[in-house]
């Protein structure tokens, strides 16, 4: 793999492949990549070689082209058109290397009116309305900046999936192709059900309305109480995990509140129409939690495993989480440059084929001469086995899904869009996510897209036999159960791979398959708290003290809730990570490595997303943080108020961008000549002064005017659009529509309805965009396909073994 990227999104793609044994050469500009200044560089660069090349120099460009001539994969994060201008475009390079897979990550895609915008995380977040969704995360009015890379990390995993799928397809055809994704599409990963609730609200506006999550400082929905954020007596914040009815009842029992279920005043709990009633119930819960210390609550959780409050961790504390250590998802190694490094292990654990993590990040210039000397000497031999086709890259692959909700299942949905067949074995009453919202099916639609629903009681011998009959002709099984469930059902990896040795098995759980927390209920906010996601975003804006009053606890609770799930969440992070693991297992088997058992978890996946803070070593560089005001990382990468209650986001962190900004601003020449801002070092020292000056300037015009003016100077400065994010993807004239991200599908309830296209685009292979099924809709058809007669199917239905949709 030749990695031309100098962005974190690209670095995490090549890190994934290097960890799994790929030979990665990172092409850096002269004097090195800006990635070297990041605290996470020892981790991002591990396992790679590098070479410094000036791509504007003909001789260096010739070296780059020679490297690509023998490569399997080229990765770049250039702005659209740059690779072609440099002579590194797919159309040019694939003539000499027809097996080349060329992967590209952009901000908004390579076509459409937004393609030319710089692909900074902050620019994408601002344009997509994400920062306004986080209003209230900081104790000030207006949009809030968040530090977690909610666009970049998912985009990196989408690129991984595109690369692996293209390599899998190359194994059949001998031909490579171009693979594209974008940060804007990556952001869409986090939306578990808002897309379809928006569709439903528009289609049935008189009967179904979307509602703000918080009104007048009080949560509006029952999920805020099921997923309670509360402070203990000794000042520890806890995130509870009681999403299902059974888990919520367990919490109420633990809190001594089961009497409420019999009291007419509280008959609708935890959902109330009255704001006063919601406030009163919320206060009761918060007071109960702060009546005990953290240690006392841990003892309570041990007595009742269906009640769980995960502690909100900070910084890289998750590297010491007992479950991370038990899962072998933490690496410690000696690095010759920085000493002992503690970091997340490979994103995917492949049992029997451990990742290669012992090779340190390359020193600047360490491999330059060797790479130059060998460039182009071993040209890749690739010839087409068959004529190229446009079929989906994963056509013919069958995946059986065992799991519920979003974190594991949506990973399979991503592969369905690439042509894989997904057979979902779900309970007779359906995946519980289907019923999470008042409108039937709304909450589950997105994770069910493209799948065949087989409703079966797997706890019966007949149900298990149905599963086994289907699994005998399956390529991959995906399971996301809590610890012990797969073993109890006879669907664990040892049992299934012992019976079906060609079956790839991915366990994609919340915490793990066993260990100290494997049995704990894990939902997106729970894992976000445990991995440090919320505090990475909110910084020191939320106090942690045993002296807080209830009036101080309540707004702080809402801040943490917004910080951990307002825009991005551990569900989306984990789902896109599981998608990468699925195709990795498939490709490994195709290449003769055998059918492995693979493992990911929500906890470790979220740690990978937070790579900036997850690499520990002595004398680590300072890590950028937004601080309590949540404006941004620096004066040249942050939100600014504009005229008319509008805001802009500016991204001009480099010297070249600073010069363009100065040219675009009124009296910018005076600003550039100011000794406080004349050099990169001076601007860093006087960052607060520069922010104050720029704020005064930006307040003089409205945000749309600034965006239009700055684009003329090629400065990344855009209006911070109002949310919600899904509106900027599906509404008429939205970014999603004009960039070509949206298509139509059929749903049995909604009929023709909009959905996102596949989040990866291939130059040769098609993608698909199917709708979602109702519970058991395909049960009869699938069972007939796998040898069951009509009489047998009728008997199984009568015995309560299967459900027929």
Image: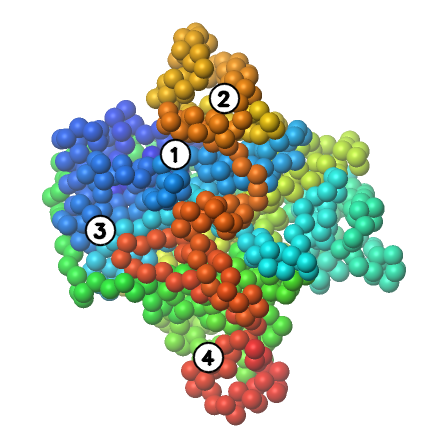
- Circles 4 and 3 in contact, beta carbons < 8 Å: no
N-terminal label among 4 and 3: 3
- The 10 Å Cα crowd at callout 4, few under 14, some 14 to 19, many 20 or more, is some
Q: Disc 3 and disc 1: Cα gap in Å?
A: 26 Å
N-terminal label among 1 and 2: 1
Q: Mark 3 points at which residue?
A: 100
Q: Disc 1 and disc 4: Cα gap in Å?
A: 47 Å
| Residue at figure coordinates x 57%, y 42% from the top left | 723
x and y, in percent, of residue 667 in the image: 44, 12
User: Quick check: 212 above or below 121?
Assistant: below
- Residue 393's image quarter? bottom left
Q: Name the residue under label 1.
A: 118
Q: Nearer the viewer, mark 2 or mark 3?
A: 2
Residue toward you, 192 or 50: 192
Q: Of helix, strand and loop, which one carries label 1?
A: loop
Residue toward you, 330 or 364: 364
Q: State whether residue 260 appears in this view.
A: yes
Q: Which quadrant of the figure contains the N terminus?
A: top left
Q: Name the residue under label 2.
A: 635
Q: Disc 4 and disc 3: Cα gap in Å?
A: 38 Å
- Circles 1 and 4 in contact, beta carbons < 8 Å: no
Which dot marks residue 782?
4
């Amino acid at each position: 793999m030749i990695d031309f990227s100098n962005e974190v999104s690209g670095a995490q793609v090549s890190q994934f492949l290097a960890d799994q044994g790929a030979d990665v050469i990172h092409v850096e500009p002269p004097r090195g990549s800006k990635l070297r200044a990041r605290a996470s560089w020892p981790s991002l660069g591990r396992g790679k070689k590098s070479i410094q090349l000036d791509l504007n120099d003909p001789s260096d460009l010739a070296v780059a082209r020679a490297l690509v001539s023998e490569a399997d994969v080229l990765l770049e994060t250039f702005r659209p058109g740059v690779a072609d201008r440099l002579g590194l475009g797919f159309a040019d390079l694939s003539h000499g290397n027809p097996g080349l897979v060329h992967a590209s990550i952009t901000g908004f895609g390579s076509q459409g009116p937004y393609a030319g915008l710089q692909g900074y995380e902050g620019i994408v977040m601002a344009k997509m309305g994400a920062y306004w969704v986080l209003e209230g995360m900081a104790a000030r009015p207006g949009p809030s900046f968040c530090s977690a890379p909610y666009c970049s990390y998912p985009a990196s995993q989408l690129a991984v999936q595109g690369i692996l799928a293209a390599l899998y397809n190359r194994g059949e055809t001998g031909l490579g192709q171009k693979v594209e994704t974008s940060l804007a599409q990556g952001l869409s990963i986090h939306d578990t059900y808002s897309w379809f609730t928006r569709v439903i609200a528009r289609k049935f506006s008189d009967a179904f309305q979307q509602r703000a999550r918080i009104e007048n400082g009080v949560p509006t929905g029952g999920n805020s109480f099921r997923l309670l954020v509360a402070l203990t007596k000794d000042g520890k914040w806890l995130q509870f995990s009681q999403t299902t009815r059974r888990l919520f009842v367990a919490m109420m029992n633990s809190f001594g509140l089961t009497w409420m279920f019999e009291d007419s005043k509280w008959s609708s709990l935890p959902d109330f129409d009255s704001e006063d009633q919601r406030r009163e119930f919320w206060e009761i819960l918060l007071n109960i939690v702060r009546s005990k210390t953290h240690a006392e609550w841990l003892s309570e959780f041990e007595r009742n495993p269906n009640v769980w409050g995960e502690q909100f961790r900070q910084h890289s504390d998750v590297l010491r989480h007992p479950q991370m250590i038990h899962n072998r998802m933490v690496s410690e190694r000696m690095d010759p440059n920085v000493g002992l490094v503690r970091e997340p292990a490979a994103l995917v654990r492949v049992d029997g084929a451990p990742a290669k993590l012992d090779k340190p990040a390359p020193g600047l210039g360490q491999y330059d001469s060797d790479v130059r000397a060998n460039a182009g000497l071993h040209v890749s031999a690739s010839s087409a086995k068959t004529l190229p086709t446009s079929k989906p890259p994963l056509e013919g692959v069958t995946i059986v899904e065992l799991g519920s909700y979003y974190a594991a299942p949506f990973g399979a949905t991503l592969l369905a869009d690439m042509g894989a067949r997904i057979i979902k074995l779900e309970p007779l009453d359906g995946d519980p996510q289907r019923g999470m919202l008042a409108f039937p099916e709304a909450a589950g639609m997105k994770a069910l897209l493209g799948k065949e629903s087989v409703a079966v009681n797997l706890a019966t011998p007949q149900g298990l036999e149905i599963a086994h009959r289907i699994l005998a002709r399956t390529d991959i099984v995906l399971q996301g159960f809590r610890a012990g469930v797969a073993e109890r059902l006879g669907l664990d990896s040892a049992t299934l791979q012992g019976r079906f040795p060609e079956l790839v098995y991915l366990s994609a759980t919340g915490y793990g398959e066993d260990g100290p927390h494997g049995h704990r209920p894990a939902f997106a906010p729970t894992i976000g708290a445990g991995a440090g996601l919320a505090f990475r975003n909110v910084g020191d804006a939320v106090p942690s003290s045993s002296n807080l009053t209830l009036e101080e606890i309540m707004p702080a609770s809402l801040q943490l809730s917004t910080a951990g799930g307002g825009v991005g969440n551990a569900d989306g992070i984990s789902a896109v990570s599981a998608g990468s693991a699925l195709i990795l297992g498939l490709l490994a088997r195709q290449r003769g490595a055998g059918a492995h058992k693979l493992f990911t978890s929500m906890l470790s996946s979220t740690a990978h997303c937070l790579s900036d803070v997850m690499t520990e070593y002595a004398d680590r560089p300072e890590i950028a943080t937004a601080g309590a005001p949540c404006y941004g990382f620096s004066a040249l990468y942050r939100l600014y108020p504009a005229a008319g209650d509008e805001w802009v986001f500016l991204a001009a962190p480099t010297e070249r961008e600073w010069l363009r900004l100065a040219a675009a601003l009124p009296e910018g020449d005076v600003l550039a000549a100011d000794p406080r801002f004349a050099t990169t070092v001076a601007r860093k020292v006087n960052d607060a002064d520069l922010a104050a000056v720029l704020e005064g300037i930006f307040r003089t015009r409205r945000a749309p005017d600034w965006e239009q003016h700055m684009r003329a100077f090629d400065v990344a400065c855009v209006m911070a659009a109002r949310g919600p994010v899904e509106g900027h993807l599906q509404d008429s004239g939205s970014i999603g529509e004009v960039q070509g991200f949206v298509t139509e599908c059929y749903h049995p309830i909604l009929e023709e309805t909009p959905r996102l296209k596949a989040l990866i685009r291939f130059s040769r292979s098609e993608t698909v965009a199917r709708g979602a099924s109702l519970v058991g809709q395909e049960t009869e058809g699938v069972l007939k396909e796998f040898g069951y007669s009509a009489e047998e199917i009728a008997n199984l239905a009568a015995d309560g073994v299967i459900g027929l949709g």
